[in-house]
Amino acid sequence: MELAVDLMRSLLQTGLLLAIPILGTATVVGLLVSFVQSITSLQEQTLTFVPKLICVSLAIVLASNFILKTLTDFCISMFNLIPTMAQ
């Protein structure tokens, strides 16, 4: 039972760690575009989509090395735990 809790905790921590760069970028860009829209009184709904799309795509490209390394380390640690689960 304790192993299952540790595995879920590790899984959730890894997922959160991988999502932070992408979600953080989308949040910051969304807030900046909303701020600019409120200052300039532009209320175009599609205006927020393009900058978010560009910045999130760039964040994914820039964070891909970190994401791949983190996922690889997580998978290796999970495969190393398989013999301990059989006991």
Image (cartoon, grey):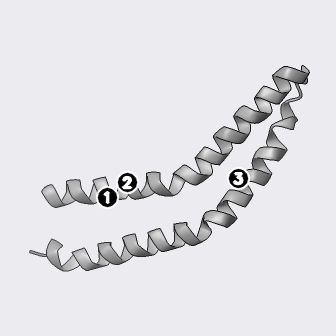
Residue type at mark 1: give it: Ser
Residue 14 percent across, percent down from the top left: 41, 58
- Rendered view: 66 above or below 56: below
From the viewer's perspective, tell me whether residue 18 is left or right of residue 2.
right
Of residue 9 and residue 24, the one placed in the foreground of this image is 24
> Along the polypeptide, which appears first: circle 2 or circle 3?
2
Give the residue pinned by disc 1: 10
Is the residue marked by circle 2 packed among few (<14), some (14-19), or many (20+) residues within 10 Å? few
Is the residue marked by circle 3 packed among few (<14), some (14-19), or many (20+) residues within 10 Å? many
Residue 13 percent across, percent down from the top left: 37, 54
Give the residue pinned by disc 2: 13
Give the residue pinned by disc 3: 56
- Rendered view: 11 above or below 33: below
Rounded to the nearest whole Å, what is the CA distance between mark 1 and mark 2?
5 Å
Rounded to the nearest whole Å, what is the CA distance between mark 2 and mark 3?
21 Å
Residue type at mark 2: give it: Gln
Image quadrant containing the N terminus: bottom left
